[in-house]
Amino acid sequence: MEVPQIKSNKINNQNFFSLSRQRYKVWTISGFAILISLIGLISSWLNPSIGLPLRAGLDFTGGTQIRLERKCQKECGLISTISISNALNDISDSNEGIPYQKLDGARIQFLDGYKSLLIRTPTLSAFESKKVIDSVVNIAGPFDEGGQSIETIGPTLGKKLLRTSLISLLVAFLLISTYISIRFDRKYAFLALLALSHDVIIVCGVFAWLGIFQNIEVNSLFAVALLTIAGYSVNDTVVVFDRVREINRSKINLSLKQKIDLAVSATLTRTLYTTGTTLLPLLALIFFGGTTLYWFAIALALGVIVGSWSSIALAPSLLSLSND
Amino acid sequence: MARQQGWFALLLALVISAFLLCIKLPFQLGLDLRGGSQLTLEVQSLQPSTPVTSDQLEAVQTVLDRRVNGLGVSESSLQTIGTNQLVLELPGEQEPSKAARILGKTALLEFRAQKPGTKEAMQRLQRFRNQVKNISLLYEKNKNEKLDLSDKSFQSKQITDLRKALNIKSDSLIDQRQLDEIKKKIDDEIVMLFEPSFLTGSDLISAGRRQEQNLSSWEVTLSFNQDGGDKFAKLTKSIAGSDRLLGIILDGESISEASVGEQFKVAGITGGSATISGNFNADSARELEVQLRGGSLPLPVKIIQVRTIGPTLGAENIRRSLIASLSGLFLVAIFMLVFYRLAGFVAIIALSFYSLFNIAVYALLPVTLTLPGIAGFILSIGMAVDANVLIFERVKDELRRGNTLIRSIETGFSQAFSSIIDGHFTTLISCLSLFYLGTGFVKGFAATLGIGVFISLFTALSCTRVLLKFFMSYKSLRRATNFIPSNQLPSQLI
């Protein structure tokens, strides 16, 4: 990320950081990032194993995820995932009442150096999940009973969650832009919305690529992250716009470009510091928060960085375009 | 200055009461933090076109509530979500399959009299049923001894006969699924042999269970209300001494068929009580008792989501989120101290108050803390700091312009106000949208972040102000260089 540097904090009309001179650079960088993101989203969509712009996780597809923690003395021995899937096939063969196609579609994954075992299957009943656990004990056990987690989401619920996530995103966008239209005007609202779409598209794009190359999936927490990013991004943009409006009133003799440059430099330190203070707790979450919150925190951190870029550079530079 | 002291005292009182709240009130921890099972049930309407009404949902909840209480899990909770969902939380429960079995059943209990002239058909079906039961036992035994299941000798002639008799067209090797299928078919045919019911579980007052005299099996006892007792007497009277049986049918499956003795010919079995014995073991008798006590569900329910989290995983989650929160706060504190000096120190105190108030509100409302909820709190720390940063940057600007310290602080607060309001409001809008449209843990995240935004408005605009003014009342602290490096100040002020 290119954040323009200023040498001195002294601010006067002659010596402020000039965004307007850099604006073509800003547009190139943002445009390029969006292009790569869109390519990621489209390739993910075209990818037959994904079929969606983002690799949908359990929450959205429905299914069962069983997570087991192995009890190991020191290090956990290697176990091939094939032996586990054979064990699963054995249950369907042994007439235990789990339909074959359910276990045939299972995905098996070891995490944390073979310490935990993750089994993803199409939706299983509570009874069936127990059968699955019982059968893999022979191969990968013993398991730590206190460390296990089973999550089952019915397929219709998955679709519903996806729908409500999208609706809440749209509603939030709409409400936020209404609020800004009331507090500022429609032009500001449009630009803030543009900046926030920029941020959301880039974060989605990164996760599309992660889905293609690292099999990272997005779940409801990711939708939550997007909404938080939206709120944060607009928050940041509004602070800059607020200053533009203030300068607009007090320094009437300057051109719009100069006013915007002045507003951006006046809020630059604040934006960078705020980005820093928001990133620090997120870093703590990334490093200490555990696996559940890991990708959530990464998405948020990414969104915070992109969000401050769009509010320092993109939104104001577009604002200067509007009244040229 | 005295007025400043008054505000300070008020703030102190607030902090103390928040602290007391935190100690006195228990926190509600979500299942992902303490382990347990969560089941989401969907109430299904009888016709797809008619949605479930709120009355029906409430009726289902009442029945399930009673069944849940029968499960004997402490601190369990059952809540309705939306228009047709119920969420059941069972803290500490590691086997949701047990709960699922009890909750999912309709438990429609019916007493029916056998149709006249069906004696032979009944005997034939009962014989079939016994055969299936024997095959199941044999099968179970074979499986446990790990015998070769494809052994031809296991395919008894009985099975072939059964298939023929029941019109089941399949001649593959027998397996559990097929046995279940055959059993279901037999059950259905048995139920067909009974007349429609006029005595159902809705006439029950209570249900109990006790061991049978031979101690090897259990029986479930029932007592009817006045009306039910009369119906029961009438029903038993009509078939007493005949070759017709009394069928006890649960969820469309006949669990017991009993004959009624000649001696009840005159008045039927009176007194309003009955016993079902049908080879129950201790567990299955208890299950039936719980289901009957809870009454029958007015609508079928389907389990659409099950989450089970082990207790050590929950404890690990608590530990991790504590570390993440504390180190997040710590890192932010260092940041503020480095960049804002004395003001940074004030911000740290305000931030500690902020965290304390947050926690007190969680306890007071109460908010169920989940992992995403804690993430919401951690994120709101960043937002809370933002307000302080906005103010302090404005104060610095004023100092650079050559204003006096006290005046700069005043102006800083008032000028940052509009940005702070706008920024907080947009975040709040996201939270509201998440809270109203989201479900489950999404709600938890929205709740903690939203509360954080509210409290941040308060702490930034009042706590920081009061504290800063309190510090400024000490002359030794009232120096611009406590806020900004001296080389940035206009020369006349140094």
Image (tube, rainbow, N blue to C red):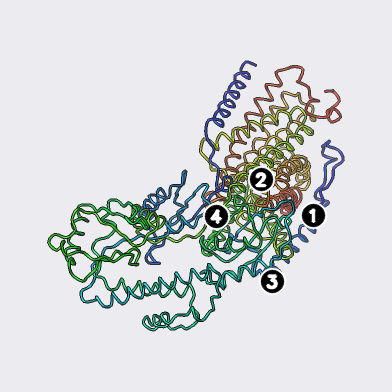
What chain does badge 1 belong to? A
The span from disc 4 to disc 2 (Cα, nearest Å) is: 35 Å
Residue A105 visible in image: yes
Q: Residues within 10 Å of mark 1 (few under 14, many from 20)?
A: many
Relative to A297, B140 lies left or right: left
Percent position of residue B159, x then y: 42, 80
User: Which secondary structure lies at badge 4?
Assistant: strand
The tag on residue B382 is none
Q: Earlier in the sequence, mark 3 or mark 2?
A: 3
Label 4 environment density (alpha carbons within 10 Å; few <14, some 14–19, many ≥20): many
Q: Nearer the viewer, mark 1 or mark 2?
A: 2
Q: Quadrant of residue A70?
A: bottom right
Residue A47: numbered disc: 3
Q: Which residue is mark 1?
A: A26
Left or right of B38? Residue A242 is right
Asked whether A189 or B110 is in front, the reply is B110
Q: Residue at x 62, y 57 (%)?
A: A67
